[in-house]
């Protein structure tokens, strides 16, 4: 619980382990017991045939909403499933209260198909700035964390993205074609050029982690949902990477960005991709 005169940074110094425990417990109670055991009635579709939601998504988000709110009284939760039920919830990102941004199962399609490429994403933001993040790949027992100005870590080991290797094509994960419109596909076609090796993305959170680890050069996405990006963007930043829109501005979790945008392991890669995307728009 935050003290009356305590800053968010002081709260994090005191309670980061409690947040980590809340994330792990939500996954252990609501997600992993259903992994590779989902019944047909536990899976639904939202906006289309590929936009899946499960009981694990809903129940894990409810548990995180209760537990995170109790840790930081006065905070609010912006979760993917809550926003689906009531889009007005998203407006809290533009308010003055601290906001927990939650994606209970990022990579739901992978989760439904029994693939371990999914994760739980939690970020803490205040007045549009992401201050801390937790990326938990429960099926792999990997936890990545970041606090603004204090670095990024994977299972306690410091992450450094490092520069892209010279002389080879840049590996770039891009918005999956199943989730893009024809107009978005046309914009992304700018990446199919010499020196780049684009591929469809999986879980956004795990793709961001791959950038922070220096295993992937960049991601390019054409949607703004804060729960998909907030945790990973801070992870990349604190590992030494950067993110930028085609206008040259950083991506804002509060919205209103020019899309597609990129997050990359180094500034030179980000500038190159942003230039290609800007020329195509």
Image (tube, rainbow, N blue to C red):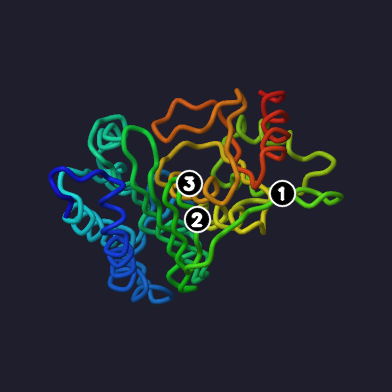
Residue at image mark 3: 234
Residue found at x 31% / y 43%: 84
Quadrant of the rendered image containing residue 52: bottom left
**Circle 2 — which element?**
strand
Residue situated in front as seen by the camera: 7 or 208: 7
Q: Position of residue 19 (x, y in %)?
A: 29, 60
Q: Residues within 10 Å of mark 3 (few under 14, many from 20)?
A: many
Q: Residues within 10 Å of mark 2 (few under 14, many from 20)?
A: many
Residue found at x 29% / y 66%: 26
Q: Position of residue 175 (x, y in %)?
A: 59, 44
Residue at image mark 2: 152
Residue situated in front as seen by the camera: 67 or 47: 67
Please give left or right for residue 96 compared with residue 183 in the image: left
For marks 3 and 2, give the one nearer the viewer: 2
Residue contact at pointers 1 and 2, CB within 8 angstroms: no
Q: Position of residue 245 (x, y in %)?
A: 58, 30
Q: Real-space Cα distance between discs 3 and 1?
A: 17 Å
279 shown above or below 233: above
Please give left or right for residue 62 compared with residue 271 in the image: left
Q: Real-space Cα distance between discs 1 and 2?
A: 16 Å
218 shown above or below 114: above
Task: Look at the image and tell me in which quarter the N terminus lies.
Answer: bottom left
Residue found at x 67% / y 59%: 215
How many numbered marks appear? 3
Q: Position of residue 194 (x, y in %)?
A: 85, 41
First in sequence: mark 1 or mark 2?
Answer: 2
Residue at image mark 1: 163
247 shown above or below 186: above
């Amino acid at each position: 619980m935050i003290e009356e005169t305590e800053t968010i940074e002081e709260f994090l110094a005191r309670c980061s382990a409690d947040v980590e425990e809340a994330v792990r417990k939500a996954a252990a109670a609501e997600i992993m017991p259903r992994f590779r055991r989902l019944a047909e009635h536990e899976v639904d579709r939202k906006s289309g045939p590929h936009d899946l939601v499960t009981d694990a998504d809903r129940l894990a988000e409810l548990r995180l909403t209760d537990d995170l709110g109790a840790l930081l009284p006065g905070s609010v939760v912006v979760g993917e499933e809550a926003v689906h039920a009531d889009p007005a919830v998203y407006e809290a990102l533009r308010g003055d209260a601290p906001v927990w941004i939650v994606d209970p199962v990022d990579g739901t399609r992978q989760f439904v198909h029994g693939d371990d490429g999914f994760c739980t994403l939690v970020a803490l933001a205040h007045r549009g700035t992401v201050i801390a993040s937790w990326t938990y790949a429960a099926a792999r027992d990997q936890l990545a964390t970041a606090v603004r100005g204090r670095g990024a870590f994977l299972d306690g080991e410091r992450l450094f993205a490092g520069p892209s290797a010279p002389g080879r094509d840049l590996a770039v994960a891009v918005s999956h074609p199943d989730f893009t419109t024809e107009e978005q596909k046309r914009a992304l076609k700018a990446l199919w050029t010499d020196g780049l090796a684009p591929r469809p993305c999986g879980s956004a959170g795990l793709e961001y982690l791959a950038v922070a680890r220096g295993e992937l050069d960049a991601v390019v996405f054409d949607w703004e949902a804060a729960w998909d990006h907030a945790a990973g963007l801070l992870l990349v930043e604190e590992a030494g990477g950067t993110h930028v829109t085609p206008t040259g501005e950083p991506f804002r979790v509060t919205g209103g960005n020019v899309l597609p945008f990129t997050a990359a392991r180094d500034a030179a890669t980000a500038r190159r991709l942003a230039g290609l995307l800007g020329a195509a728009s």
